[in-house]
Image: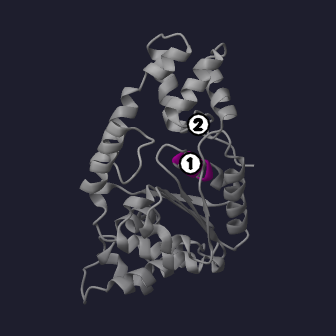
């Protein structure tokens, strides 16, 4: 059974089912039949922690983990995620195989770049065959891989198309793909592939909030725990930040403490996320902040 890595046990409370799905994925890929798991949920629900658990367990299952992370400023860099994901192993092996020379100069900065530039479709297909080559050893035997992509919602369009094409054929390869991101419509194509499975970590239950709070404050008042649940909505990231703020401030774990505190880290994170939203969405968030969470949508 996959287990949380040190320091992440809090955010992985109530993630037994999700960890079991990831372990099954790794076992199947090690046996030669790959697949994909797409983890989608709101920010702070532990997607990265699940991805990290899969990466940490890959070696024990005989898979080599490769990792890339989407970034907002690089969303328009064509095939940037694919290059970051596969580039280290490609360079370690001396570049792409000779039959995939078109990738050498186009994506990995090697070769003389002679000849016409390949089209986007050609790059997608070429990247699939590159993975097919990388997941085999020099003797042609299996060399299973884990391809882990975090912040999938920031992935460039070319890399997303590559992941879709790869996932459609993963049952032919000893390759596991784990991708995590916020739920967005542009990810629906990947999630709909026949070899993909989607999981959506839920907010923590009141019992899990209680367990997490008492790891930091064994003598916490019941009212403090209820206030934590109310303030954070059961979001693991917000819970961890709230508890850290209470501890750092030396405040007693009472009901009033949690209700009065909104951690600076949470505020900064929220402001950053709102800044990245389209203008209409920002205006809606501002209206809800003024009118309250229970305001009817038409009124907001």
Q: Is residue 46 visible?
A: yes
Write the residue at 42% across / 69% down: 186
Residue indicated by mark 2 = 8
Write the residue at 35% across / 39% down: 291
Q: Which of the 4 quarters of the picture holds residue 59?
A: bottom right
- The percent coordinates of residue 150 (x first, y second) are 47, 55
The answer to whether 180 is drawn above or below residue 230 in the figure is: below
Q: Which residues are magenta?
A: 48-54
Residue placed most toward the observer, 260 or 21: 260
Q: In the image, 217: left or right of 297? A: right
In contact (CB < 8 Å): disc 2 and disc 1: yes
Marker disc for residue 52: 1
- What secondary structure do most residues of the magenta stretch adopt? helix
Q: In the image, 143: left or right of 181? A: right
The answer to whether 192 is drawn above or below residue 274 in the figure is: below
Write the residue at 48% across / 22% down: 259
Q: Which of the 4 quarters of the picture holds residue 245?
A: top left
Question: Mark 2 falls on what kind of element?
Answer: loop
Marker disc for residue 179: none
Residue placed most toward the observer, 211 or 258: 258
Measure how far apart labels 2 and 1 are at the Cα level. Answer: 9 Å
- The percent coordinates of residue 241 (x first, y second) are 47, 29
Mark nearer the N terminus (2 vs 1): 2
- The percent coordinates of residue 300 (x first, y second) are 34, 48
Residue 165 magenta-drawn? no
Question: Mark 1 falls on what kind of element?
Answer: helix
The answer to whether 235 is drawn above or below residue 140 in the figure is: above
Q: Is residue 143 visible?
A: no
């Amino acid at each position: 059974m996959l287990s949380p890595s040190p320091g992440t046990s809090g955010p992985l409370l109530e993630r037994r089912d999700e960890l079991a799905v990831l372990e099954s994925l790794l076992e199947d890929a090690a046996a030669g039949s790959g697949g994909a798991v797409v983890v989608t949920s709101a920010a702070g629900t532990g997607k990265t922690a699940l991805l990290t658990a899969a990466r940490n367990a890959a070696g024990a299952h005989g898979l080599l983990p490769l990792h890339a992370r989407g970034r907002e400023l690089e969303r328009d860099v064509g095939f940037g995620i694919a290059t970051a994901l596969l580039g280290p192993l490609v360079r370690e092996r001396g570049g792409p195989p000779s039959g995939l020379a078109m990738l050498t100069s186009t994506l990995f900065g090697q070769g003389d770049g002679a000849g016409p530039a390949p089209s986007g479709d050609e790059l997608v297909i070429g990247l699939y065959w590159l993975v097919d080559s990388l997941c085999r050893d020099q003797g042609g035997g299996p060399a299973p891989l884990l391809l882990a992509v975090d912040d999938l919602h920031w992935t460039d369009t070319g890399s997303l198309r590559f992941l879709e094409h790869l996932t459609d054929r993963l049952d032919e390869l000893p390759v596991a793909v784990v991708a995590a991101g916020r739920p967005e419509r542009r990810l629906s194509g990947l999630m709909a592939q026949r070899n993909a499975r989607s999981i959506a970590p839920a907010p923590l239950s009141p019992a899990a909030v209680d367990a997490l709070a008492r790891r930091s404050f064994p003598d916490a008042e019941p009212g403090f725990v209820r206030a934590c649940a109310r303030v954070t909505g059961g979001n693991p990231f917000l819970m961890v930040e709230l508890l850290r703020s209470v501890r750092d401030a030396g405040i007693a774990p009472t009901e009033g403490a949690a209700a009065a505190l909104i951690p600076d880290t949470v505020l900064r994170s929220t402001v950053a996320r709102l800044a990245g939203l389209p203008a209409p969405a920002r205006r809606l968030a501002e209206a809800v902040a003024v009118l309250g969470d229970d305001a009817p949508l038409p009124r907001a």
